[in-house]
Image (spheres, coloured by chain):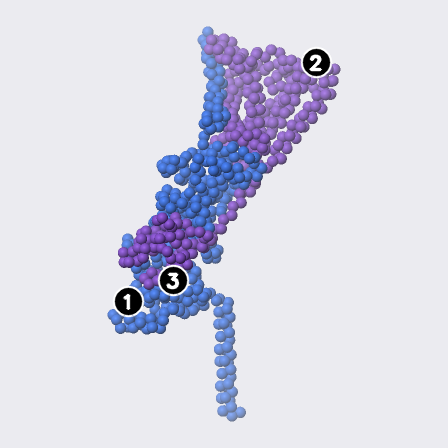
Chain colours: A purple, B blue
Amino acid sequence: MTVDTNLHSAPPAERRSILPRLERLVIVIALIGLTLTGLPQKFAGELWSHYAFVLMGGIESTRILHRFFALLLSAEAIYHVAAFLYRRLVLSAKRADTGGNALIATFRQLLRNLGGGTADYRFVLRLEYWVIVISAVLMILTGLALWKPVAVTNVLPAEIIPLFRSLHSDHALSLVVFLVLWRIGIALLWRPKRIAAPVATASAEQIASRRRTFIPVALIVAGVVVVGLFSFLTSTQTAISTVIPREAVIYAPQAMPDSGDPNIGAALWSTLRCAFCHGAEAQGGADGQPALRGTEVTLIDFYEQVRSGRGEMPAFSAEDLPDGYVLHLYTWLTQPGE
Amino acid sequence: MTIRIRMLLILGTCLLVSGLALLSVNTLTAVAQEATPDVTEVPVVLEATAEAQAEVSAEATTEAPVDEASDAYCLLCHSKPDQVWHLPSGETLSVTIDPAVLAASVHGETSTEGALGCNDCHPGFRYPHEPSTIRSVRDFQLERYAVCRNCHEEQYTRAQDSVHGEYIRANRVEAAVCVDCHGGHDVQSPNEPRQRISLTCGRCHGAIFEEYSQSVHGQALLGEDNPDVPTCIDCHGVHDIANPTTALFRTRSPELCAQCHADAEVMDRYDINTNVFDSYLTDFHGSTVALFEQETDGAVTNKAVCYDCHGVHSIQPIGDGTAIRETLVTTCRTCHPNASADFSNAWLGHYPATPEHQPALYAAGTVYDVALPLAALIPLLLLVTEVFRRLRSRGK
């Protein structure tokens, strides 16, 4: 078992394991995948996002791809934690001097650059490592909550969903900006030396003995985490998969409603020919046509007269004035207090 | 055989052949009538009394001759009360025309294009009328409405492309044609007063009209003559009315609402927040719907659009949001059946976070307002100062 399972270790070539390189490859693929599928979602209204979605087969497939890369990163995170614990608990690995706190080292180097000092850019890899670790924790937790908001809000207050969305979105953009510029610096100018890998301090017997406990426990814990993640993602239905059922009677010729609406009646009056003779407000016509506001005729009599006409007044068929509209008119005409 | 017997036989044969021929023609006609009953021509029978007919004939013959193509000629009969056309369907159609109504219509005396006469819309009609193939009132309307095209080509063509036109072609004869909305003779300006628009649609879409009339839009239109609220056509269009049950209509519907609700000039009058559309688009539902609209015309999404939460035709005022908050979780559960009781608190109500309202969210936004520039600034500073350091050391 090799001991160089560390993201930023650079052991001698003959001891170099495939695993750290594989980890790096997985992280690079996951981060690029998450960026390419995430940024168009953040900037969904932009034209370039539209083309990105077209390339990825639409918004739904983009979201599926984003979740795939997120799961890839999560799997790598689980493995990375296990490998870290293995080095600490089984190998009792110790690292040579790494130059102290990476953030402080950054500012020290800034000052050295301004003051004409020497360059020691080993810290840039450590700072990048910790940025990725902290970001991965934040992004995976908030991302899972956004993936399954209903399951999460069954336990946590619902207000965290917009909070997590904001954090996920803002942090992702900050991370992408940082990593792109940081990698440009590493490639072009800083060119840091790799930090020596941690070296095991435990004896071969100690390692063999600890492994017998560590491996089963690690497998069980990893299994529980994977099963937990799987059940979290599958146990609760977030939303129905069909379009919201909605029923409406589209073709329904006006029938007699249960009650009349004076507003509709008033609006009808302004559109019908009744006003020509009975006045704009049904107050009565210039040629002695009766006022209809406040009329005391019964609904049945009113209806009969509308349908049959009387004297000068023409009959209005149901085609001219549907039954429902007759009731609305009557309700407005007999509305008290007017 | 004597000549007399021969002649009798010839005569008998001729009679037999003639009889058989007559019988077969009658039979064939009957079969033809049974097979194509719709094209049977029937005489146009009006409920004019013999007295009225005689009167008309007398007027037509004794007084100064009336031009057969003039309105006056048509009105000799059609201005008389109770003129009814009995149709084979058993229905009757009133064919009495009130010249005053016609004159007061948009096609009457006030028309800037000049008043229309009877023959403009009923060309070639003379008295006595030709037998007609019309069997019902609806037949008559469907046969006549195409005449509107003579002057209103654009509107007619757009109506043909509409959901109504599509239904008519599929023999759904209840779908509206020109005369159903505009009338035949009493044609008024269709959008004056503005309430007329929705009252017209409500004649056939009664259930929807009832909902609309009780909504914040409907009450303002019908009760207050409000010029800003939408009538039916503001969302559905006028002649080229699209089918509102399609995926395309659904995904485009937020833009319909935004026509007014993103317009600050209109919304300021009612103290309504215009951030609704933008805040919707930045939300999960809105961005998904907007993206679906961009993808393909037929792409279906079930992500919520405005009307899923606010109602389609029964939209009520939001007020201070208390009422809608109380029922919001029920609305959420329409699509998220497992949603917790406070699930609706995940929704910010179209408002951006403030220190008083959603302080944690506000703080997070503020932190990243600083963190994002820092994420760019730190690497850039380190890059620039490294270049500076190298230049300086090279100079030495």
C-alpha separation, residue under disc 2 versus residue under disc 3: 109 Å
Write down the chain letter for disc 2: A
Tell if the residue under mark 1 belongs to the same chain as the one under mark 3: no
* Tag in front: 2 or 3: 3
Considering depth in this image, is A5 or B140 the residue closer to the camera?
B140
On the image, the x and y values in percent for residue A82 come to: 65, 22
Q: Is residue A336 above or below residue A307?
A: above
On the image, the x and y values in percent for residue A325 come to: 41, 54
Number of the label disc, if any, that sits on residue A308: 3
Identify the residue position indicated by label 2 in the image.
Answer: A202
Helix or strand or loop: what does disc 2 sit on? Answer: loop
* Tag in front: 1 or 3: 3
**Furthest residue to the top?**
B396
Identify the residue position indicated by label 1 in the image.
Answer: B67
Tell if the residue under mark 1 belongs to the same chain as the one under mark 2: no
| Residue type, numbered disc 2 | Ala
**Furthest residue to the bottom?**
B2
Helix or strand or loop: what does disc 1 sit on? Answer: loop
User: Is B120 positioned to the left or the right of B276 in the image?
Assistant: left
Question: Is residue A307 visible in this depiction of the protein?
Answer: no
| Residue type, numbered disc 1 | Asp
Q: Which picture quadrant has residue A315?
A: bottom left
| Residue type, numbered disc 3 | Ser
On the image, the x and y values in percent for residue B376 come to: 48, 21
Residue at horizontal 51 percent and vertical 74 percent from the top: B27
C-alpha separation, residue under disc 1 versus residue under disc 2: 122 Å
Helix or strand or loop: what does disc 3 sit on? Answer: helix
**Furthest residue to the left?**
B64
Q: Is residue A102 above or below residue B205?
A: above
Considering depth in this image, is A146 or B48 the residue closer to the camera?
B48
